[in-house]
Image (cartoon, coloured by chain):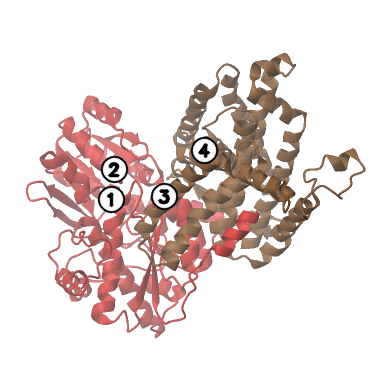
Chain colours: A brown, B red
Amino acid sequence: MFYREAGDFKTTYKDDNQTFPIKFDRYRYYAVMFAAFAVIPFLINDYWVNAIFLPFLIYAIAAIGLNILVGYCGQVSLGTGGFMAVGAYACYKLMTGFPEINLFFHIIISGGITAFVCVLFGLPSLRIKGFYLAVATLAAQFFLVWLFNRVPWFYNYSASGQINSPERSLFDITITGPNADAWAKYLFCLVFLTVLALIARNLTRGTIGRTWMAIRDMDIAAEIIGVNPLKAKISAFAVSGFFVGVSGALFFSVYLGAVEVGEVFGINKSFLVLFMIIIGGLGSIFGSFAGAAFLVLLPVLLKNVLVGGLGWPTDLAAHLEFLIIGALIVIFLIAEPHGLAQLWRVAKEKLRLWPFPH
Amino acid sequence: MKKLATLAVGAVMAASPVLADLVIPSLSYRTGPYAAGGIPFADGYEDYFTLLNERDGGIGGVPVRVIECETGYNTEKGVECYESTKGEGALVYQPLSTGITYQLIPKTTADDIPMHTMGYGRTSAANGDVFSHTFNYPGNYWNGASGAINYLLAENGGDLSGKKIALVYHNSAYGKEPIRTLEELSSKHGYELSLLPVDHPGQEQKSQWLQIRRDRPDFVLMWGWGVMNQVAIQEAANIRFPMENFIGIWWSGAEHDVLPAGDKSNGYKALAFHNVGRDFPVFDDINKYVVDAGKAAGAGDQVGNVLYNRGLYAAMLAAEAIKTAQGIHGVADITPGMMRDGMEALSITEEKMASLGMPNFGPSFDVSCENHGGEGLVGVAQWDAGSKTWSLISDFAATDGEVIGALVEADSSAYAAENNIASNCS
């Protein structure tokens, strides 16, 4: 009734190609952006930011990055944790080595460094595919974690091998460290997420995204129609690496503040981000958000309901959390193998026809 | 984003009731790879406060409320736990994880909440001049490393030159802590140190123990936690390494670490900064007021275990600090800031422990503004596989304060310079 193209006239090609062609979607998008930038910062406290929003925003960046590689270009990667560690350690070295440069640029440069490392480990993808590539990226995961544990230069020769993020500010507002305000940390990450999501959305709609998808769907056919597999695959690794690196840098500097590589960026992290995009929906930007939200928010919600609301013992609640989330993942994937993004898509299709489905 | 909003609205957050109580958060881990160590500690910690509530009606007339939060030894969950409990008026944090400790050191300082990392965490936090809100009395890892070497010195007639000592350690911040001290001591006492890292979680140690079999070190020290301990002791038994020459840190010396290896673990030693066993009057009260009343934390089957005692000891020190704070400020319902003052003025004497039903349970020590680490006395316990008991074979003895003091000074002043921390005591 209110959700349809009819009546929403477009007179230019630019309008016709916009991300949200339906008026309702567009307003919803503006409303979400308004709420995220202008309402939430005034309402949140430390708990909401540190336990809910920061992990969601940062994991969403990582999920978008991995989705570009796995969902759009079809190159399976199990090295996300290792690549996030590259971003985090690059950020640490830059923050301590060049304290006069702003943190904002450090995070961008960390992303660039990660992109480079990611391309290096992506080179085998020109020869190997599927599971074999997954194993090669798995090697990257273990190698990188080992490297950051083994070489003291990366953690500035500290006794314990931990890296700690020093206090840094932007426009005289503290962003990292214990004295940073909740809203400042939130907005800093939100800006990164918004800009990166816009870039990802537009990359995947353009030529480069189409070459990725061509490679994903059938690489031989893509080659025949003139897609250069070297360029397509390497660019996917580079862009994905950049996103994952930025998320790793934010994860370390803004969110945790102190990181130990084996514990924080272990293989579990790679799987977590991979599950996010599988549950959210491969090859969908919205899916990355939905998957990150699902796996970050649901455990916190369950914990608060079971322990805080019902007063159950913490260990029982923690075990039940595993059960419930595991069961939900299985049910979701049986009901909709293409993830939450597909459910969303189907819902929108139905809404277009509503209330006259036939 | 829409989904986020829906979920956020649904999130029920426990509102804090405005009652006079002393809030003690217990950041425990009863799940995950380190649960075997986390459960007894959390039980002991909670049981002691239950005892105080049931027997004495709290501390200074104010009941204690323990809020448990499951971290699973995971830093991200640790953050969530910290943020969700700090608003309730949490008096002191004891995260029982080096990773979470490192993260909370700056946060607790900014929020004016003290943190007690008893025998773990950042060793140089012993320098209270730099680390105003972090305490690690009665002993830290560098005391432990030095205590082990002192014990070996005593066993070998005061001379370790030419001996080979291997350190098997958890390849993390925690396991790396003693290395610098052991290196310093090696140049002082002339032993040869070899380092054998074991990666998380430590189930795979074949290559490390193969190397030990080849190099034949005279002594093996271990900094392990969780499943790593059991595997190491089993592997040591497999290569027939003499157990009496194998010394673990205090986190590698609980019942569940040695039991899987059966009789072969007989004679294994571990460091200790508090006493073992249940031969103390306080356990009668625990049985009477807590266990028999059906109020024991967890399954209630851990009473008297090494790590249960450690939880009990941690809770006792926290309770004594609360009493000290109440005395200083003349208020029964203290704030976290007052708690910090109480911890800084804490003095544990033999008489005090005896009056609590815990005679000789730990070393006596005093905390001051400059020294947040106590005197760092370390004892050694040995496992008897026949009777399945630990017993203290060497009483709490002093460690090499000269070497440790210099290292603490160097590390903490580097931290102070990095983070622009002004002197806390002057």
Closer-to-camera residue (A200/B371):
A200
Question: Which residue bears the numbered disc 4?
Answer: A81
Question: Which-is-in-front pick, marks 3 and 2?
Answer: 3
Can residue A204 be seen in the rendering of this structure? yes
Q: Amino acid at mark 2?
A: Val
Q: CA distance from mark 1 to mark 4?
A: 27 Å
The percent position of residue A33, horizontal first and vertical second, equals 73, 55
Q: At 41% from the left edge and 58% from the top edge, which residue is drawn?
A: B125
Question: Which residue bears the numbered disc 3?
Answer: A322
Q: Amino acid at mark 4?
A: Gly
Asked whether disc 1 touches disc 2, contact meaning CB atoms under 8 Å apart, the reply is yes
Q: Amino acid at mark 3?
A: Phe
Single out the residue that lies furthest toward the right: A11
Disc 1 and disc 4 on one polypeptide chain: no
Question: Which residue bears the numbered disc 2?
Answer: B227
Single out the residue that lies furthest toward the front: A358
